[in-house]
Amino acid sequence: MKHLKSNHFIFLIIVALMGWLIPGAGYFLLKEQKRAIIIFVTIILTFCLGIYVGSIGVVDPIGSKPWYYAQVLNTPAVMILGHITAGGSYPVYGRPNEVGQIYTSIAGLLNLLCIINAVYLAHVTDHNTEEVKFL
Amino acid sequence: MIYLVVLATLTSPEQIGTTPQSLLWLLPLVASIAIVYKATKLSTITTANFVKEVIVLFGSIIVFMLITALVLFVFAWLVTE
């Protein structure tokens, strides 16, 4: 029984980590392909649109830490962009900065919502019947 | 990883003025929020059902924001008159 519980806990962690590494991948593990594809495409497009509008300068781990923490929720790969922009070589000001930061950060927060929802679904899914219980 | 390499080439921002038209940038964001939210909430996703739900949520958010803007505008007008 203890062994089963520990396996279940590890599975939940894997679902969360996969959802963070690749947006929507947590649902893919739960065999929710449609949901996974919709979430992947939407979150990646939102993030890319933010970067397109504001440039990679909107990912700023030094000057705008709270936004950066939300942006990293998209995928840990954002930290690579943060490393590139950390020197302050890509300054962005005004409305493009606002729009870019809002888009990229909201994309990250939406991914957090998806990670939490995927973990919840993984937790409440009855693996004997594969029945998924929604909120 | 490939898309990050592409993104890393986007080093100069677009031109967006501080005009009323720049508020239209909220529309794609609201669409994203509606799509992701409905993707997490619907128990079964069919194209027709999903599109209908997303459009309803998208419209609700926009209408609510317009009402909020109108109320704030009237309040500001009353205070400054």
Image (tube, coloured by chain):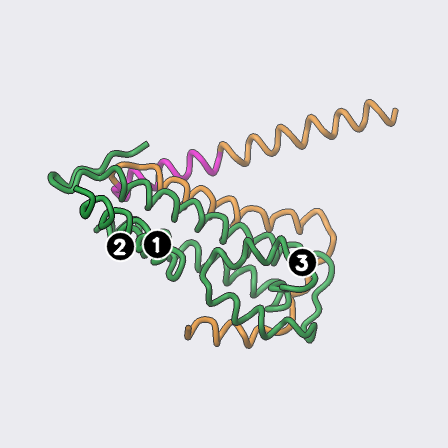
Q: Which mark is residue A28?
A: 2
Residue indicated by mark 3 = A64
Q: Nearer the viewer, residue A113 or A103?
A: A113
Residue indicated by mark 1 = A24
In this rendering, position of residue B41 left or right of residue A76: left
Please determine whether, in this image, residue A83 is positioned above or below residue B35: below
Q: Name the residue furthest right.
A: B81
Q: Is residue B57 magenta?
A: yes
Q: Is residue B68 magenta?
A: no
Q: Find numbered disc 3 in the image and state the secondary structure of the residue it sits on.
A: loop
Q: Name the residue furthest left.
A: A128
Magenta highlight range: B45-59
Callout 2 amino acid: Phe
Q: Nearer the viewer, residue B4 or B54?
A: B4
Residue visible at 74% across and 53% down in the picture: B18
Judge if badges 2 and 1 mark residues of a common chain: yes
Query: The residue marked by circle 1 belongs to what chain?
Result: A
Q: Which mark is residue A81?
A: none
Mark 1 Cα shell of 10 Å, populated few (<14), some (14-19), many (≥20):
many
Cα separation between marks 3 and 2: 33 Å
The chain letter of the green chain reads A
Quarter holding residue B74: top right
Mark 3 Cα shell of 10 Å, populated few (<14), some (14-19), many (≥20):
few
Callout 1 amino acid: Gly
Q: Find numbered disc 1 in the image and state the secondary structure of the residue it sits on.
A: loop
Query: The residue marked by circle 2 belongs to what chain?
Result: A
Colour of chain B in the image: orange
Callout 3 amino acid: Ser
Judge if badges 3 and 2 mark residues of a common chain: yes
